[in-house]
């Protein structure tokens, strides 16, 4: 069983007198910076000169410096720029400003595990990885709750890396939900697998194929959107609250019977598992990481083409129209235009 920590195991005071720098003000960055500030920590945000987030962070009451100045200022430096630019940002602006005894933190293990960033031996290297989107890290904190986090320590130069990680998890509210101890390797591999096979890759493909099947059979696209996309969240919310049993309790017995009869027709057990294992192997062997690093070096042609293609898919255009009349989106700060 994994080791779990909760608020009672964390001492926020371990961050007393420490200056905390958050590099980046995107999904995770804004949430960590604001939550830590409201938990009483001394926080600064590091951004590029001219970043559209500069004024936004200042308006939220945060101090903002350039990445290099913020890295120099901070004792604890959390890397919350996109994974694919972290190595360049680290080389240019962070490494020259790291001091012995500083803590370098990450919210995902990619760059340390795949050795895109190799910090000096005299700094702590650790991870607090929230298991949820940044906007949820923020909204749950505001509501007195928290998104569970993973904690991993790669280098414990000061002997205090665990204290800092647990205090940080408490500061962003994550310890309210629970902090599970892991390693950079396990976090990296399981995070990549989860998002590729199930959460993002698997779910989007499943919804798209379901939507297309209904539309190709002559049903209204709006109807297909409601059945295969809109209801996904409602079903997942039930599973999130009480497991599959809670969902099955809430859905009709007809739906539950259909679940048993057709689920494995759509996702054949042996074949799907074989494909999932192949995806996992590519992650473990570094094949996926190599592809992603190369894609960024080559101007992201595949990535950009796929993104443009998906934006034109009727499941997206029909969905956008229908969602205009469903005023229950809570994440009003989700800025998909810039993402
Ligand atoms: P994001 O794309 O939402 O935001 C990145 C921020 O970095 C933006 O503000 C961008 O303007 C800034 N930035 C980009 N290039 C920069 C540069 N050269 N110099 C300075 N700033 C720059 O990123 P995110 O999704 O919050 O991801 C941050 C980290 O958190 C990643 O390691 C990611 O894997 C991890 N993470 C993200 C989520 C999530 O829900 N998005 C969940 C868990 C962990
Ligand atoms: Mg994840
Ligand atoms: Mg991820
Ligand atoms: Mg139904
Ligand atoms: Mg039922
Ligand atoms: Mg994104």
Image: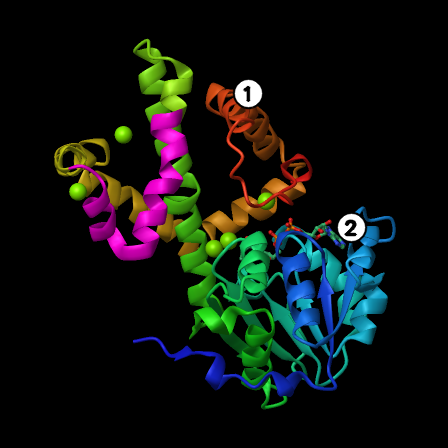
**Does the Cβ of the disc 2 residue fall within 8 Å of ligand 1?**
yes
Q: How is the image coloured?
A: rainbow
Left or right of 227 on screen, residue 102: right
Q: What residue is shown at x 62% (from left), y 61% (from top)?
A: 116
Left or right of 295 on screen, residue 262: left
Q: Secondary structure at mark 2?
A: helix
Q: Within the image, what quadrant is residue 77 found in? A: bottom right
Q: Quadrant of ligand 6?
A: top right
Q: Secondary structure at mark 1?
A: loop
Q: Is residue 246 magenta?
A: yes
Residue that carries the numbered disc 2 in the rendered image? 53
Which percent across, then down, holds residue 62?
A: 79, 64
Q: Is residue 299 visible?
A: yes
Q: What residue is shown at x 87% (from left), y 53% (from top)?
A: 49
Main SS category, magenta section: helix
Residue that carries the numbered disc 1 in the rendered image? 312
Taking 5 as reference, is 267 above or below it? above
Q: Which residues are magenta?
A: 226-252
Which percent across, then down, holds residue 260?
A: 13, 38
Taking 119 as reference, is 233 above or below it? above
């Amino acid at each position: 069983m994994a080791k779990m920590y909760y608020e009672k195991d964390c001492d926020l005071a371990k961050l007393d007198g420490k200056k905390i720098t958050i590099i980046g003000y995107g999904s995770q960055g804004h949430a960590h910076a604001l939550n830590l500030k409201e938990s009483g920590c001394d926080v600064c945000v590091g951004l590029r000169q001219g970043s559209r987030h500069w004024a936004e962070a200042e308006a939220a009451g945060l101090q903002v410096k350039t990445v290099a100045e913020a890295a120099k200022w901070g004792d604890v430096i959390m890397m919350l720029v996109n994974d694919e630019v972290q190595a360049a940002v680290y080389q240019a602006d962070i490494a020259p400003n790291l001091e012995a005894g500083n803590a370098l933190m990450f919210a995902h293990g990619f760059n340390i595990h795949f050795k895109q960033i190799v910090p000096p031996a005299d700094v702590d290297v650790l991870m607090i990885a929230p298991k949820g989107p940044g906007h949820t890290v923020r909204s749950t904190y505001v509501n007195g709750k928290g998104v569970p986090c993973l904690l991993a320590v790669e280098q414990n130069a000061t002997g205090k890396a665990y204290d800092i990680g647990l205090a940080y998890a408490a500061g962003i509210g994550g310890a309210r939900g629970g902090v599970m101890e892991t390693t950079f390797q396990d976090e990296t591999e399981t995070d990549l697998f989860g998002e590729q096979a199930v959460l993002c890759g698997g779910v989007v493909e499943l919804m798209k194929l379901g939507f297309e099947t209904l539309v190709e059979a002559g049903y209204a696209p709006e109807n297909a959107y409601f059945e295969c996309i809109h209801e996904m969240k409602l079903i997942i919310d039930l599973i999130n609250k009480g497991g599959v049993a809670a969902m099955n309790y809430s859905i009709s017995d007809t739906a539950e019977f259909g679940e048993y009869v057709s689920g494995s027709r759509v996702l054949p057990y042996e074949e799907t598992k074989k494909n999932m294992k192949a995806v996992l192997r590519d992650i473990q062997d570094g094949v996926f990481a190599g592809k992603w690093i190369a894609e960024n070096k080559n101007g992201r042609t595949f990535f950009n083409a796929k993104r443009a293609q998906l934006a034109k898919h009727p499941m997206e255009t029909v969905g956008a129209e229908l969602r205009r009349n469903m005023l229950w989106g809570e994440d009003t700060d989700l800025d998909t235009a810039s993402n």
